[in-house]
Amino acid sequence: MSKHIVVIPGDGIGKEITDAAVKVLQKIDDKFHIGLTFETKDAGGTAYDKYGTPLPDDTVEAAKKADAVLFGAVGGDQWDDVEPSLRPERAVLGLRKALGLYVNLRPVKVSSVLAEYSPLKPDIVTGTDIVIVRELIGGIYFGDKCESEIHDGVERAWDLENYSVPEVQRITRFAMEAARKRRGKVTSVDKSNVLATSRLWRRTVIDVAKDYPDIVLNHYYVDNCAMQLALNPTQFDVIVTGNLFGDILSDEAAVLGGSIGMMPSASIGELTSLYEPIHGSAPDIAGQGIANPCATILSAAMLLRYSLDEDAAAAAIEAAVDKALADGWRTADLYKEGFKKADTHTMTDVVCQYI
Ligand code: NAD
Ligand code: IPM
Ligand code: MN
């Protein structure tokens, strides 16, 4: 039986990093005989330039039918002035919505090898092992918006945040179940001292938690949580939060492990799941062949684990990435004197060799 993967490279470094992950998946297939097949689809600014839309229907239909989607990144300055509903970023937002991907899992694990790359002192960051469970298809990202309205000569724009009880219940349950398989702790993050949506969020989380008496639950306001991540990151196990706070906190948490170029994610929901690095299209380094492919390669490992039930193959990728780092291979984002400098191709080849 074959397993069909739709690959959506997108813009900027998107093609470089998805090419790398596909190469690793092909190596995995040689070894584990999963029967992987790949199909590439357009999205983002490159799709807008070709077809006048960042998310062609054909891409959505292929994603819905696939066993899993591997996504690169979208966006770039050249599309900054495009009409907002046609911006490249609409592609990833539209796919998340079309596939009902209400969970975004963002693991942040600081290996002993990379602890010294953290902007924090090794004794603070060593042992950090967090999963951020970000709500992905609600909140301010998908509320009513107004780009611009002029009243009495004053221009105004707005984005309205809203969350319903069922939306908060399902993401909370997912976080509680995830914590059960880990260290049994959930931290819910909100701004309930100010926002109505956050008050509903906190009330609902407390209510759902009654079904999980074995889980230790605590709450932080998002501003304090941002500080706690830098002050004492090992206190966290599972963090559950809304769409916007999850976006911001995960970029902050990503650097605990040295580089955003190492951080994978899985978006899970009602249809096909989608796997993508948490970073963007990195226009500042696109086309140079120096992007760190590990975030996307590790996203491919999550794909094998969550969509294809191929735990051994996923673990083989993770072990190969760990070994490449332990052996001193470093892409530009992590390079220091005394290490072996790797461009995107070299890092990918080293990982393939170690599988
Ligand atoms: P970014 O994540 O693209 O880049 C931030 C910084 O991290 C840059 O200095 C970049 O060079 C570096 N970086 C990112 N990935 C790296 C990698 N794999 N290896 C080495 N260095 C890496 O964020 P940004 O600059 O704020 O956004 C650029 C574009 O990407 C924007 O258009 C934004 O909307 C888009 N974006 C898309 C996604 C997505 O498609 N899911 C996610 C985030 C940002
Ligand atoms: C991410 C990105 C996206 C988000 C953008 C590109 C829409 O920042 O995946 O983290 O905000 O969700
Ligand atoms: Mn982001």
Image: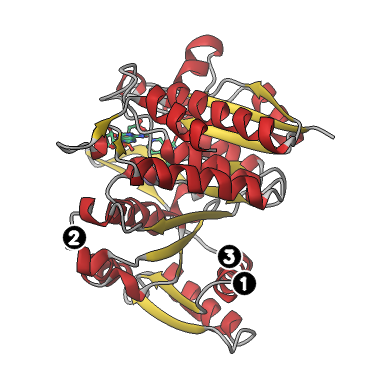
- Nearest the viewer among 298 and 99 is 298
- Judge from the rendering whether residue 51 lies leftward or rightward of residue 288; answer left or right: right
Q: Position of residue 148 (x, y in %)?
A: 34, 37
- Dot 2 lies on which element? loop
Q: Residue at x 37, y 54 (%)?
A: 250
How far apart in space, not on screen, are marks 1 and 2 (Cα)?
30 Å
- Judge from the rendering whether residue 193 lies leftward or rightward of residue 135; answer left or right: left
Counting residues from the start of the chain, the first of labels 1 and 3 encountered is: 3
Extreme-right residue of the structure: 1
348 w.r.t. 139: above or below: above
Ligand 1 location (quadrant): top left
22 w.r.t. 126: above or below: above
- Dot 3 lies on which element? helix
Using a 10 Å C-alpha cutoff, classify the residue at mark 3 as few (fewer than 14 neighbours), some (14 to 19) or many (20 or more).
many
Q: Answer whether labels 1 and 2 touch (C-beta < 8 Å).
A: no
Query: Of the numbered discs in the image, which one, if any, rests on residue 120?
Result: 2
Dot in front, 1 or 2: 2
Using a 10 Å C-alpha cutoff, classify the residue at mark 1 as few (fewer than 14 neighbours), some (14 to 19) or many (20 or more).
some
Q: Position of residue 92 (x, y in %)?
A: 52, 36
Q: Quadrant of residue 231?
A: bottom left
Q: Position of residue 342 (x, y in %)?
A: 31, 28
Using a 10 Å C-alpha cutoff, classify the residue at mark 2 as few (fewer than 14 neighbours), some (14 to 19) or many (20 or more).
some
Residue type at numbered disc 2: Leu
Residue type at numbered disc 1: Glu
Q: Residue at x 53, y 14 (%)?
A: 52
Residue that label 1 marks: 177
> Dividing the image into 4 quarters, which one contains the N terminus?
top right
Let me know if residue 88 appears in the view. no
